[in-house]
Image (spheres, grey):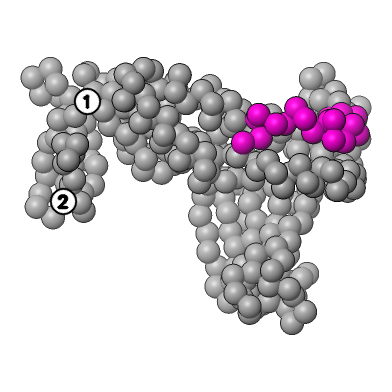
Amino acid sequence: NAGVDLHFGSEFLDLKTENESTLIKIRSNAGEKLLKADYLIGADGFTSAVGKAAGLADPLVVPLLQAEIILPDDWDPGVTKIWFEVGETPYFYWLIPESEREGVVGLIAKPGTDIRKLLDSFLEKGKYQPLAYQSGQAALHSPGEKLENKVGDLNILLVGDAAGQVKVTTVGGAVTGLSGGQAAARAILDEVPYRKTRLGVTRELDLHFFIRQLLEKMDRNDYVRLVGLLTPSVLSFLNRYDRDTMRQHFWKLPFKQPAFVVLGLKLLFFKLFLLPYNPNTGEQNH
């Protein structure tokens, strides 16, 4: 009713200039065709073909690997568990039940890591028997990335994984990716720059980027201390405000637990003054 044409089963190929107009080249079972549009939204993943055609850089990515397992006999299928093993990954391992009997065990690692070796070692230590493996990559947010461009008369916007609209704390991007999609829609409807309409989600992602910088300075003792600071008041706060809207409420946390300030200052000190820091020992290197 709004005048939208839907082209199902189609693949974006490239951009083509004809008569001073930029056209979108797509391919379907019926063959190739050229489409005219005012806007093109790239929501086609971290290896975005739309982004490449627009001259926009791919986001950074990290590898993920998990194994399907049979849950231990005494495992409560309502419980998800994570492990912080900072000597192996700056992220975490997880065990997530998927039914009464089965679950997945996995991890996120830095690029270039032998992630299969890490997972197999973790499975062996936990006595988990892998039934099958599932792998993938997740995009990461990088502050200041350009997510829009104009090619001729065609406005191009990237959203979701193509735009790296993923929280780098937990490497989750479902909610922030949808927020990016909403921002792109507002940019088109209100005829304003995308960088303005996505300011809210960008600031949210920037906060998670800042938190990730601090997390990567933490050692095992810091994590033990952090978990020990989760008082009933803090847990109630985290129940009330989810991690996708943390920017509006993050400043309230020190009032719930003043000891967060001490831990944060310790980590900031090493970051701001560029002191070499060994995350495995938590000590300054000289």
On the rendered structure, is 137 left or right of 125? left
Could you tell which of marks 1 and 2 lies nearer the N-terminus?
2
Three-letter amino acid code of the residue under disc 2: Ser
Q: How packed is label 2: few (under 14 Cα within 10 Å), some, or many (20 or more)? A: few
Cα distance, mark 1 to mark 2? Answer: 21 Å
In the image, what residue occupies the spot 21% across and 19% down?
A: 153
Residue found at the far bottom of this picture: 73
Residue 254, position as x, y percentages in the image: 83, 30
Residue on which the image places disc 1:
38
Residue on which the image places disc 2:
28
Residue 29, position as x, y percentages in the image: 13, 55
Q: Residue 154 carries which label?
A: none
Q: Which of 129 and 260 is in front in this view?
A: 260
On the rendered structure, is 215 left or right of 99? right
Disc 1 to disc 2: CB gap under 8 Å: no
Which residues are the magenta region? 245-264
Q: How packed is label 1: few (under 14 Cα within 10 Å), some, or many (20 or more)? A: few
In the image, what residue occupies the spot 40% across and 22% down?
A: 194
Asked whether the viewer can see residue 200, the reply is yes
Q: Where on the picture, by quarter, is residue 122?
A: bottom right
